[in-house]
Amino acid sequence: MKNSSFTIRTSSDFGLDLTVRSHGYYQTPPFGWDGLTGVLSIAMRLPGGEPFIAYVRENGSGSLRVTVPGGLDDEKKREIRRVVPHCLKLDEDLSGFYSMCEKIKKFGDAERIGAGRLLRSPTAFEDIVKAQLATNVAWKQAARMIHNLCQLGPKVPGSDRRIFPEPGAILSAGDSWLREKGRVGYRAGYVIDLCGKVADGSLDLSRVDRAEIRGADLKRLLMSIKGVGKSTAHYLLMLHGEYSSLSIDSATHALMRKITGKEMTDGQIEARYRRWGKYKALALWYEWVTASGWLSIE
């Protein structure tokens, strides 16, 4: 079968590797990451169509090459051009953040290494479900729950990969399946409630996908969702370019102990990053990826 490919332009400060591995979502469907070849794969499909996989790699400075097995019609190409830039946040302007980083030695390499963009799922619905499943649990266990849930999603033909299930598929499986097969525990109630509201139209998350809801309005919407507390809402806000609120949890306190050698209160952590203004969550994230051991950056 012949492959089809095309390119997508990026800014000069974009780095695929660090964007993909910016946090744990790359370890969950619909993503796959080959660290040896530097190829990101994304399972997706057109509405009502058959699932397929798009393979994304850097194509020299300033562009990505997207490859799809088989034919590539205009409709499929348009969907890829929507999903890939959305997931990689290609349109985000980080010049203000980089300008601040230049003034602080430990942040000086941020622009060079392409740091600052956080991988997100093709839809806000997927990101919220993943965040619900990641509450009060180690990431390894959360990733396992997400993979379990995705057994409800359509399978890519000729592959073991699946796309994220639609709300209706999760509702059809029901609470008992989520608890017994998905192994998500009490979080099943949160996921079922979210799916019900999306399915009946009382919660329109497509407006979030289109960036029609921002700032305080987006925060209020996220915190109105069961299973999304303050810290989780602040984390999700980062995926939509909102960095003025810190996501502080036990992992944050552990990081502060490692960086500063002392216990810090939430207030002290807030004070540490206050000078970063609207980029303070991004500054905390950068310290996390460089000091926690999550990534090896050269």
Image (tube, grey):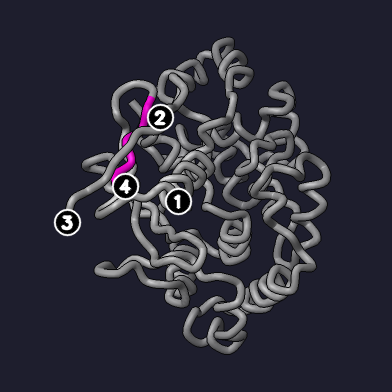
- Which circle's residue, 4 or 1, is located before the other in the chain? 4
The Cα–Cα distance between marks 2 and 4, rounded to whole angstroms, is: 16 Å
Q: Cα distance, mark 3 to mark 2? A: 30 Å
Classed neighbour count for the residue bearing mark 1: other residues with Cα under 10 Å, few (<14), some (14–19), many (≥20): few
Amino acid at circle 1: Glu
Residue 233, x across and y down, in percent: 71, 51
Stretch in magenta: 63-67
Report x, y in % for residue 155.
Answer: 37, 71
Residue at which label 1 appears: 75
Q: Quick one: label 3 or label 4, which is nearer the N terminus?
A: 3
| Residue at which label 3 appears | 1
Label annotation for residue 55: 4
Secondary-structure class at tag 4: strand
Dividing the picture into quarters, in which one does residue 256 lie? top right
Residue 274 sits above or below residue 167 on the image: above
Return the disc, 3 or 1, that comes first in the chain's sequence.
3
Outermost residue on the left side: it is: 1
Q: Earlier in the sequence, mark 3 or mark 2?
A: 3
